[in-house]
Amino acid sequence: MDLKSGSPFWMLKNAQAEFHPPLTDDHRCDVLIVGAGITAALIARALVDAGMQVCLIDKRQVGWGSTAASTALLQYEIDVELQSLARTFGIDDAVLAYRACEQAVESLTRLTRPMRDVDSRPMQSLYFSSHWYHDRRVRREGKLRKEQGFALECLDNSELQQRFGLDAGVGLLSAVAAEVDPVQLARRLLKDATGKGVRVFERTCLKELSPTPRGVNVTLANGKRVRCKHVVMAAGYESQGFLSERVARNRSSYAFASDPMPDPGFLANCMVWESARPYLYARSTLDHRLIIGGEDDSIDIPLKRDASVGKKSETLKRKFNAWFPALTLDVAFSWAGTFAETKDGLPFFGPHQQYGPRVHFAMAYGGNGITYSAIGADIIRDTIQGKTHPCARLFSFERLRRK
């Protein structure tokens, strides 16, 4: 499956620093993780720290799938507003999801702070109303979040113009957010994990899963076998191919990175995104580039997605310049990537009835992939250990049966 188009900035920024061999012999372990992107890396860290013998396989190189196309905004705010999520699941579960994301962002910030080889930093997040008829909805969203104890500022038009040069009706400014280089973080986590005994095999493709009452027998494309107690499917958007049930739909998202700027303005310490769907968003990098993303569409054909990258980048540039005319920029690198979104905006973590309790899926789908992955790593660790994570039920496949 072709997951990305164009020239993703992280691929050009981060040359392959370390290679791992393919798996060419039969192997045994406690847990086999399928995938070696940021989701798999976070799960491997959680499992090895819990004392498990872990092995990862990936048909590509570490971080070279969807991770390389991620724009890596870490937010507790998900694509579905809290008020909308509350209408679907009730206010308690909606707040549970938002609070778990908030804690995950804080945890990821603590995790990356001492990592000198990973570009990461805490940020603020500004969510603004794109149209006048969104103003009431965004104000209502801010009021609800404040009532539920989330710290944020509700800004009116004059405050937005004064502080951000933004002519919008309403803005919600959150203090809990962060940015990261996803490829660097995936590599660093797996480097640390290999130092604790985790085995990583690249260019190794899964062919078949055969669960048994005591474990899972895995057959690779090269005919070799892996016997393990549990399998974690952390292959990003390709994991859907192992389920007969359609649990999400694939879409394409587009982004570009600018050349370094003398001064990125308020974006040096604040990411920004709008209330329209699909939404425009922007962040900066440590070398003062801006990354602008959005223009999502339903294209799931690589050649059609490839052909759209240039036009979509120009559209993103035009829309960004319309909102922020003081920040002029040019397109240096542009790309597109496949992503998947669930109907309700929440991820799936845990076993699916098709395979039984020993095959766990890590589907961190939606705009909060890395944040969701940090939560999912804990859910999967707790599930394997026979514990119950507070979010396990809400983020399980069982919610498909309850509707």
Image: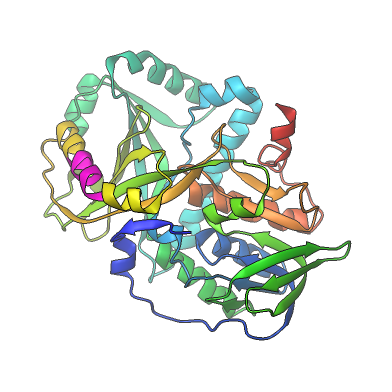
Q: How many marks?
A: 0
Residue 291 visible here = no
Question: Which stretch is magenta?
Answer: 309-317
Q: Is residue 203 left or right of residue 318?
A: right
Q: Is residue 272 magenta?
A: no
What residue appears at the point 61 percent right and 23 percent down from the top-left corner? 88
> What kind of colouring is applied to the model shown?
rainbow
Quadrant housing the C terminus: top right
Q: Nearer the viewer, residue 158 or 129?
A: 129
Q: Is residue 123 left or right of residue 314?
A: right
* Relative height, residue 233 to residue 76 (above, below): below
Q: Nearer the viewer, residue 11 or 134?
A: 11
What residue appears at the point 35 percent right and 42 percent down from the top-left corner? 124
Q: Quadrant of residue 138?
A: top left
Whole-percent x, y for residue 22 in the image: 56, 81
Residue 297 visible here = yes
What residue appears at the point 65 percent right and 55 percent down from the top-left corner? 242
Whole-percent x, y for residue 320 in the image: 20, 37
Q: Quadrant of residue 260?
A: bottom left
Q: Quadrant of residue 380?
A: bottom right
Q: Is residue 22 left or right of residue 303?
A: right
* Relative height, residue 143 to residue 102 (above, below): above
